[in-house]
Structure formats: structure tokens, C-alpha cells
Amino acid sequence: DGGITQSPKYLFRKEGQNVTLSCEQNLNHDAMYWYRQDPGQGLRLIYYSQIVNDFQKGDIAEGYSVSREKKESFPLTVTSAQKNPTAFYLCASTGGQGTGELFFGEGSRLTVL
Amino acid sequence: RKEVEQDPGPFNVPEGATVAFNCTYSNSASQSFFWYRQDCRKEPKLLMSVYSSGNEDGRFTAQLNRASQYISLLIRDSKLSDSATYLCVVNLYGGSQGNLIFGKGTKLSVKP
């Protein structure tokens, strides 16, 4: 079945550690996105990529980094510079010119201890 | 005005009730509008796009009011399974999905 796979689903990290969240899609979508969701809040865009080897900062990119070496993969690294990293992270993709329906992965819940 | 604003609720309604949510947006030139549904601790899923002329999908009706800059979602004959958070999503500035702005969501709880 086609879809987006995020891993890990739950992750615990100590302060000062970097952590990388995986996002893989087999939908042949060009555009991929990372969002962050905090309790009772809407989704906020961290980074997005519309094509391989290219990506743009979203509204809250500070403390995060991404890469897009393959069409299928868009990993997100939460660095130690991110001051409040505990959140629910959602990866999404969309086909066409990046104007269609967003398909989301199941999310990764990061807790910093 | 906040970019995309929704009443957070919760809306507590009995089964069979009709319930409506509104969502206001700040940019009058916005072109694309969507309603997503998010179950507790799950990912959002597209419920329906909102077209200028309004559109209906079964018990769900979406409407756009450009003059007053809001979109609405009407749910008729509410089911227990409709309990979820409904996210209003607007492409505020056009272009790619990188310009999508999510509202904070309206929580609906349908009771027996």
C-alpha cells in the first residue's frame, strides 16, 4: 500500500542530544513537509521541499535541519539548539505542483527528558 | 486579526444534531481552503476541500464566504464517530502548500 512512514513513533531524548526523525513515502510525490504540533495548537511548518536536493525554511525552522537526497526520503534532525523540542512531529507529502491534498504520516512523538 | 482563526470548542452535541463550525482568515486574496479531521493523537486527514460555490459530501457541507472572509463546515445528523478535532486550513498567500496555514482546530464531541 502506498503511504508515508514515519519512525520512530515515540522517542525520548536527553537535553543536549540531536535526534533524527525518519520520513519515507512511496507515493511518488515531489513535495514533502515537516510540521510540528503542540497540545491545543495548530500545525506549524518547520521545513518543506518541493524537489530533490532543494528545501525551504518554514515558519519555525530554527533548531531544525533537513535533507532531501532522495525523492522518497525527507529526514528531520532536531538539534540541541531547539529550545523546546517536546512535540508531535508530522511529515506530509503532496503530488503535482504541491497544491493538492496533504497526505500525513502517523507522526513521531518526541519527549525531551 | 489572526491569520486563521477557529473557535476551539469543545462543541458537545447529542447524536443526530446538526452542528456548524466557522473559520475566519486574514487575507482576502486567499485561494484554497480545506477542512481536515484529526482524531486524538493521530495524523490529520483531508475531510473536504472548500469550493467557491460550496460543496457537499454526504452529511457534510462546506461553504466559503469571501466577503466576510470565512469558511464553514456543517455536519448534519451527527454520529458518535464524528467526534474529532476539525482543522481549518487556508493557503493564505497562494503558491505551494508551503503557504498553508492551519487553524488550531475545533473539537467536536458527539454524545449518545
Image (cartoon, rainbow, N blue to C red):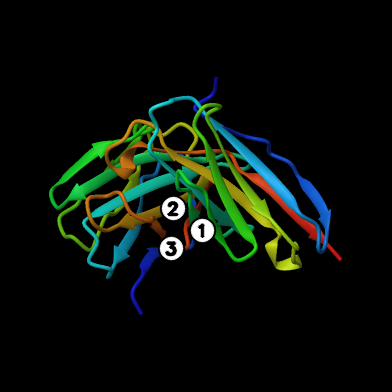
Dividing the picture into quarters, in which one does residue B24 lie?
top right
Dividing the picture into quarters, in which one does residue B92 lie?
top left
The residue positioned 46% from the left and 31% from the top of the image is A83
Whether pointer 2 and pointer 3 mark residues with C-beta atoms closer than 8 Å, the reply is: no
Secondary structure state at the residue bearing disc 2: strand
Question: What type is the residue that disc 2 sits on?
Answer: Leu
Q: Residue B43: which numbered mark, if any?
A: 1
Q: From the top left corner, tell me how far across and down residue B42 is, in percent.
A: 56, 60
Residue at the outermost front position: B53
The residue positioned 36% from the left and 70% from the top of the image is A3
Question: Disc 1 sits on a residue from what chain?
Answer: B
Whether pointer 1 and pointer 2 mark residues with C-beta atoms closer than 8 Å, the reply is: yes
Residue at the outermost top position: B1
- Compared across the picture, whether A18 is left or right of B52 comes to left
Residue density around tag 1, few if under 14, some if 14–19, many if 20 or more, within 10 Å: many
Which label sits in the foreground, 2 or 3? 2
Q: Residue B111: which numbered mark, if any?
A: none
The front one of A13 and A90 is A90
Is residue A11 something that shows in the picture?
Answer: no
Residue at the outermost bottom position: A1
Answer with mark 2 or mark 3, whichever residue precedes in sequence.
3
Question: What type is the residue that disc 1 sits on?
Answer: Glu
Relative to residue B104, is residue B14 depicted above or below? below
Quadrant placement of the C terminus of chain B: bottom right
Question: What type is the residue that disc 3 sits on?
Answer: Pro
Distance (Cα) linking label 2 and label 3: 12 Å
Q: Residue A8: which numbered mark, if any?
A: 3
Secondary structure state at the residue bearing disc 3: loop
Dividing the picture into quarters, in which one does residue B30 lie?
top left
Which residue position holds label 2?
A90
Question: Disc 3 sits on a residue from what chain?
Answer: A
